[in-house]
Each structure stands twice: as structure tokens, then as C-alpha cells.
Amino acid sequence: MMEANDALYKKLTGKSYLKNRVYKAALEVFQDLKAEAASVMEQTQKRLDQEGFDLKIEYKDKDLRELELVFASDMLVISMHSNVFEFSRVHDVKKTPYVVADPERSFCGMI
């Protein structure tokens, strides 16, 4: 019975650890995206102001996994999903040499 528990423990902790690593990597990329978006919006607003355009654009950091970009009356919401996903067994991604070489590469975060 102990061997079965050990096997289950290894599978669960292995997959949980992998999903945690993927989540942290996606979150790091999302934080980089937020920083770049804030910088671009600030530079663009300065240029609009310098050139006399009466347009308001705005960057809003809503929370850890969401941001808003406002362009005059339009809004773009960008968010990161809190779950980590694995591509389906029948998805073409699973057939790529990249994923075939390491099946853990079929897990991904979603922004």
C-alpha cells in the first residue's frame, strides 16, 4: 500500500510543482508586459501633449493579473488567467518536436 501512496504522491507533487513553475513564469511575463505598457502609454501621452492633441490615454494597473489601457473612449482590458493549462492529447502542439522532446512543455499560462 505504501508504494501506491508513494507513486500517487510523486505524481501529484510533480504536476503541482510543474504547474506552479509555469504559473510563476507566466506571471513574470505579465509583469514585464505591464511595465512596458505603462512606459509606452506615458511616452505616448507626453507626445500627444507636446503636439497639442487633446486626447487622453491612460494606463490602469487593476491588480496582480489585470490591466486596462484607455484610449480616449475605448478601453482594452488585458488579463492573465489564474489557471495553468495543458494542451489536449490530440492537439497539434503535442506533435511538435519541441513538446515531444519534453512533454512538460505542453503546459502553458494564458494572458
Image (cartoon, rainbow, N blue to C red):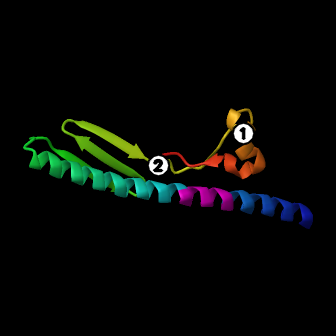
Three-letter amino acid code at the position of disc 2: Met
Q: At numbered mark 1, what does the secondary structure look like: helix, strand or loop?
A: loop
Give the spatial CA distance, label 2 vs label 1: 25 Å
Q: Residues within 10 Å of mark 2 (few under 14, many from 20)?
A: some
Residue 16 is covered by the magenta coloring: no
At which x and y percent is residue 82? 52, 51
- Which quadrant of the figure has residue 88? top right
In the rendered image, the vertical position of residue 63 relative to residue 95, given as above or below: below
Is residue 20 part of the magenta span, yes or no?
A: yes
Is 88 located above or below residue 3 in the figure?
Answer: above
Q: Which residue is mark 2?
A: 80
Q: Which residues are magenta?
A: 17-25
Q: Who is closer to the viewer here, 81 or 3?
A: 81
> On residue 96, which mark appears?
1
Specify whether 64 is left or right of 8.
left
Of marks 2 and 1, the one in the foreground = 1
For badge 1, the amino acid type reads: Thr
Relative to 32, residue 88 above or below: above
Q: Which mark is residue 83?
A: none
Report the side of 27 relative to 52 (left or right).
Answer: right
Secondary structure, mark 2, is loop
Residue name at image x 65 percent, y 48 percent: 107
Say whether residue 8 is left or right of residue 25.
Answer: right
Q: Earlier in the sequence, mark 2 or mark 1?
A: 2
Q: Residue at x 75, y 48 (%)?
A: 103
Instruction: Residue 35: give x, y in percent of width and height.
Output: 35, 58
x 72%, y 45%: residue = 99
Residue displayed at 75% across by 51% down = 102
Q: Main secondary structure of the magenta part?
A: helix
Asked whether disc 2 touches disc 1, contact meaning CB atoms under 8 Å apart, the reply is no
Residue 44 rendering spot, x and y as whole percentages: 22, 48
